Amino acid sequence: MWSPLGLEERLQALPMAATVKGMFLSNIADLVEQRSGERPGRQRYVGFKSYPLREMIELLPQAAELTYPGLPAREGMRRLGRLAYPTFSSSTIGRVVMSIAGEDPRAALHVAPKAYRLVGNTGTANVIDSGESEAILELRGVWGWPDAYNVGVHEGALDALGVDGEVLVRIHSLCDADLLVRWRPQR
């Protein structure tokens, strides 16, 4: 069962200086425009320019509703999150960072802390345990829906790496969660 969305509570608790890179806002706005004909947010976002994270927090539920009508907002946001890994890894800096991991999910999770630092200024990601086919990723200060959008981020990474897997979440607060990422090779 999904918990209440709590958008206003999240916006009130969000640090005012929190930012996110435009590539993610642009990607979401473009998809919404393709699917619904409506463009939410700004007309244009610049890929590695920083924008207020507040815009993303407000954009995600709206985009989920317009892109995946009939689904709960968190499920729509999870699906939108699946676009983040391909978006980041196709950027110049993303290609450099993710080239370290190759196609290894464990290695990709170990570069996640650097990726999170590059794409925003508030959240951290740390691998607190990892094995042959699973890892626990600790997300702290990740205001962009760690229980929905960020679950999708890591599902999208598994897809992009060509592995079958799942991402389970333990929520600690509005911005803190642990993700258990499990996988098995498809190839």
Image (spheres, rainbow, N blue to C red):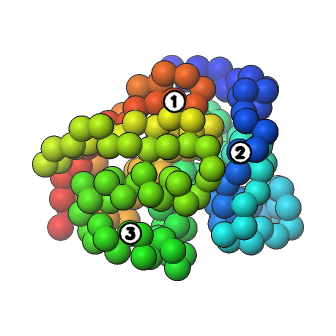
Question: Secondary structure beneath disc 1?
Answer: loop
Above/below status of 23 relative to 150: below
The residues tagged by marks 3 and 1 sit, at their Cα atoms, a distance apart of: 24 Å
- Residue type highlighted by circle 1: Asp
Neighbours of disc 2 within 10 Å: few (<14), some (14-19), many (20+): some
Whether label 3 touches label 1, CB < 8 Å: no
- Residue type highlighted by circle 3: Met
- Residue type highlighted by circle 2: Ala
Q: Which residue is mark 2?
A: 18
The residues tagged by marks 2 and 3 sit, at their Cα atoms, a distance apart of: 24 Å
Neighbours of disc 3 within 10 Å: few (<14), some (14-19), many (20+): many
Question: For residue 17, what is the image quadrant?
Answer: top right
The C terminus appears in which quarter of the rendering? Answer: bottom left
Q: Residue 77, image x and y in percent?
A: 60, 44
Q: Earlier in the sequence, mark 3 or mark 1?
A: 3
Q: Earlier in the sequence, mark 2 or mark 3?
A: 2
Q: Which residue is mark 1?
A: 176
105, 3: nearer the viewer:
105
Label disc, if present, on residue 98 of the rendered structure = 3
Question: What residue is shown at x 82% (from left), y 70% (from top)?
Answer: 44
The residues tagged by marks 2 and 1 sit, at their Cα atoms, a distance apart of: 15 Å
Question: For residue 37, what is the image quadrant?
Answer: bottom right
Q: Is residue 68 visible?
A: no
Question: What residue is shown at x 37% (from left), y 65% (from top)?
Answer: 160
Question: What residue is shown at x 57% (from left), y 39% (from top)?
Answer: 142
